[in-house]
Image (cartoon, rainbow, N blue to C red):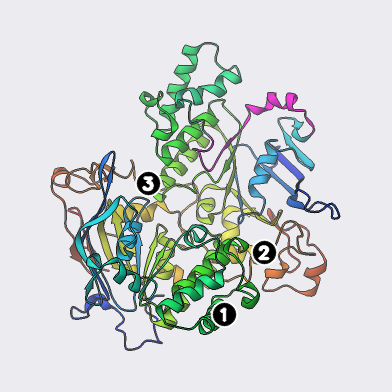
Amino acid sequence: MDEQPLLSVRDLVKHFRMPRRSILRPADVVRAVDGVSFDIWRGKTLGLVGESGCGKTTTGRTILQLMRATAGSVQFGGADLCLLSDKELRRFRSGMQIIFQDPYASLDPRMTIGKAIAEPLMIHKLCQTRAEASERVQALMERVGLNPYFNNRYPHEFSGGQRQRIGIARALAVDPDFVVLDEPVSSLDVSIQAQILNLLQDLQDEMDLTYLFIAHDLRVVRHISDRIAVMYLGLIVELAQGLEIYDAPLHPYTQALLSAVPWTDPRLARKHQRIILEGEVSSAVNPPSGCRFHPRCPIAEERCQVEPPELREVQPGHWVACHLA
Amino acid sequence: MGTDRGSQPEIPLTKGDEPDAMPLLRIQALHTQFETKQGTVRAVDGLSLDLYEGEVLGLVGESGCGKTMTALSIMGLLPGNGQAVAGEISFEGKNLLQCSSEEMKKIRGAKIAMVFQEPMTALTPTMTIGRQISEAMEIHLDLSREEARERALELLEHVGIPSPRARFDNYIHQFSGGMRQRVMIAIAFSCQPRLLLADEPTTALDVTVQAQILDLIKQLAQEAGMTALFITHDMGIVAGSCDRVAVMYAGRMVEIGPVDDVLLNPRHPYTQGLLGSVPSLDSNPGDRLFSISGLPPDLASLPTGCKFWPRCPLADDRCREEEPVLEQYGESQAACWKVMPLHTN
């Protein structure tokens, strides 16, 4: 891993200002992403996991500059994307794409899917003629497992899994290097989920794609990721090689998350001692002092309430933000 | 839950083995259909299922396989264009499908309660949660308003709502997802029903909260010796929470048996496919997942023969023409012409 990473995120911060509720009080600020750093190497997948509201989706969108960061840097293709103007960014847009959780909401219901897949090709001027574009669309549809015969149909005529294939074809039309996958299979049935995961893996191998795979299902993330980062309340609490985080999780939050995974082997399910966390995720408006996990942590000490732990490398390649790990 | 039911020793551990044990609920050849512009949708198509006292039965399958419609048929809560057109659902000596709406009102909530996936749509937004819990008890248990309030407070505390007295007069939108589900569970358990139908009760929740809620339902059901039908699409939840599991496909049952037997030794190719589609802890990351090709069938125009054949890797001519029936294999039953009856472990 000594070569240059394809993407380097450093101290990424994204705060949202809420509408003021009173002129006497300052507006609340949601600290959705509060200082996140990681690298992703070419052809690899970083899995980003955490519960709803932990900031994983915001991280993905801020990296792509779909939302502009409050602070921090994103190195990609020799530039810091956070410093570029919207116009300068255009040049980088075809190199990075996103696949959303709900492909129905992200497709124009009045545009045939053939047109939807061709649109990015035309915008980025990757095809000169209409005939060339329609040939590309046909090849893309075939590649993602859609019958090209259906290119004149509308999104509502397709099932959830097929719509996700359309979303994938559209994202890959511009031949990107880097793709953010934001919960790409979580709204699909298990049998369809497996089809889409297999497709994503095949495409990664063929096209040398680099993925940021955002998900809450730790079974899926284990399957697809080379490295995994666990987020809690806007911060990465643990980052390691895929299997290491499952075999020897160091952060108490990671341990609890893993113990709650419903594995399908009943022997395993009975043997596994569940760590049931107290309470729910705290608010990102006023995150707890010290370690943000301390109010729910089963082993928290006094120090955890005051001193925020830093993400440190405890074993080669295994990073954790916990005083007690 | 496995077989650990120490608190109810009088209940036999494996009910399926005893032919004389009367089931608490017996569904026989249930057909539930919907009239739509596309034709008749056969949501449940000849389902038979027994639920024995004290057991937790998992009902699994993908969206549209008829699992929710089975539960709604039991409750008599099918949407307007749907109807249970044939079959029988017997509960305490009555055929629920023949009950008048007055009779069903006395059974719903009191004897059979249901926990839904989305508490926001299942609960009334304009009524305080305290009222919603005590209302059912006033009607079914004939309690006074004051008594019902006291019991509602106990229930809220029992399901883990912090400071129940302060929360009693709150509305549902003032609760988080996990807390909303706790409120719905409190309502479901309030009249101590004999049968609990839980329809994907944790699907909308985060993993750590999901574990809290599953443990809560298990603990409460065990305390009350309640029978439960757990509807889910997640085999992992079945593995951790159920005694038996029934797998549904296209409105019918394709496999049923004790959880360990079905999950470790699946007979039906669909069950095998469902289990193979979920990445497991001992699989190698990067390996291709075993996936079921194609899509679930259109319930308005089902294929002939076995409904799974268009997606089945083993299908032959017989499967395309003749519909298989459930046959006994070891402790389980499966409906497939291709099952090898050789599994012995």
Per the image, the residue denoted by label 1 is B153
Q: Amino acid at mark 2?
A: His
Q: Is residue B26 above or below residue B325?
A: below
Along the line of sight, the residue nearer the viewer: B132 or B189:
B132
Q: Amino acid at mark 3?
A: Ser
Chain for numbered disc 2? A
Along the line of sight, the residue nearer the viewer: B250 or A80:
B250
Q: Amino acid at mark 1?
A: Leu
The spot of residue A115 in percent (x, y) is: 48, 22
Along the line of sight, the residue nearer the viewer: A108 or B267:
A108
Determine crowd level at label 3: few under 14, some 14-19, many 20+ residues with C-alpha closer than 10 A.
many
* Region rendered in magenta: A83-106
Horizontal relation, residue B292 to residue B330: left or right: right
Q: Secondary structure at mark 3?
A: loop
Q: Secondary structure at mark 1?
A: helix
- In three-dimensional space, the C-alpha distance between marks 1 and 2, rounded to whole angstroms, equals 37 Å
Decide which of tag 1 and tag 3 comes sooner along the chain: 1
> Furthest residue to the right?
A24
Q: Which mark is on residue B165?
A: none
Chain for numbered disc 1? B
- In three-dimensional space, the C-alpha distance between marks 1 and 3, rounded to whole angstroms, equals 48 Å
The spot of residue A50 in percent (x, y) is: 62, 55
Q: Is residue B101 above or below residue A233?
A: below
Write down the quadrant of residue B23 in the picture. bottom left
Per the image, the residue denoted by label 3 is B291
The spot of residue B162 in percent (x, y) is: 63, 75
Q: Which mark is on residue A251?
A: 2
